[in-house]
Image (spheres, grey):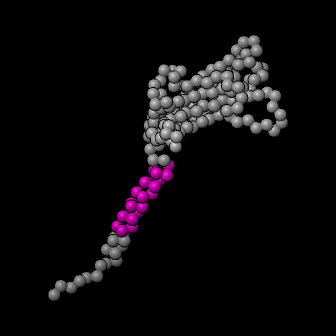
Amino acid sequence: MVTKSMPTTFEKIELALSISTFIAVVAGGVWAIYQYYLSGANEWTNNITLETKVLPYHDNLRLLVIHVKSKNPRNYEFTLNGKLGDTFELRIRKVASNAKENTVFDEEDGELISKFDMMKSVNYEEYQLLPNAETDDMSMIVLPVNTIVSISAEMNIHNGTIDKKGKPDSDYNIASTVVSINP
């Protein structure tokens, strides 16, 4: 006759630890997948910052130097493709100097002084941002003293879908700042 022996305390603990480890591994995997999709899966993300400096030029003119810094914080590369209509624009607008108190300006208000696609200005058909890479694109413009300008850098990328009007849909990211050109 075969007798069954009861598992020892050590065997019970070993079984409990194995089950706990399995549950922890499965839960960790589910949590990682959840975080991946919560963060946008492999969609593009870009952090744009603007840094400016005003330098003396000549007479009553100053040289405004603009550094547009782009950082891809994700582990996935993305590419702007000019042939698809993707753009990376820098816009400089003059802020009205005769506004009344409590006037609120939008970043797109004011006279457009300069607008250009930063991809085309350096003959890029594609603007590629590698994983965790940072770029620094510089532009300069000569402006008269006593001028206030708003600067906007906008990255626009088509996402491969069609909007309600049947046109290619796109996503964008924009950064803006205001600079005073002082004597």
Residue 14 among those drawn in magenta: no
Image location of residue 36, percent across then percent down: 45, 50
Relative horizontal placement of residue 73, taking residue 29 as reference (left or right): right
Query: What is the magenta segment's predominant secondary structure?
Result: helix
Image location of residue 99, percent across then percent down: 81, 31
Q: Residue furthest left?
A: 1
Relative horizontal placement of residue 48, taking residue 99 as reference (left or right): left
- Quarter of the figure with residue 105: top right
- 100 above or below 4? above
Q: Quadrant of the N terminus?
A: bottom left
Q: Residue at x 29, y 79 (%)?
A: 7
Residue 27 among those drawn in magenta: yes
Image location of residue 168, percent across then percent down: 49, 37
Inspect this view and state whether residue 149 appears: no
Span shown in magenta: 17-39
Relative horizontal placement of residue 177, taking residue 120 as reference (left or right): right
Q: Residue at x 45, y 57 (%)?
A: 31
Q: Give the camera-side residue of 89 and 129.
A: 89
Q: Residue at x 37, y 71 (%)?
A: 16
Q: Give the camera-side residue of 149 and 105.
A: 105
Q: Residue furthest front?
A: 165
- 88 above or below 25? above
Image location of residue 113, percent across then percent down: 67, 22
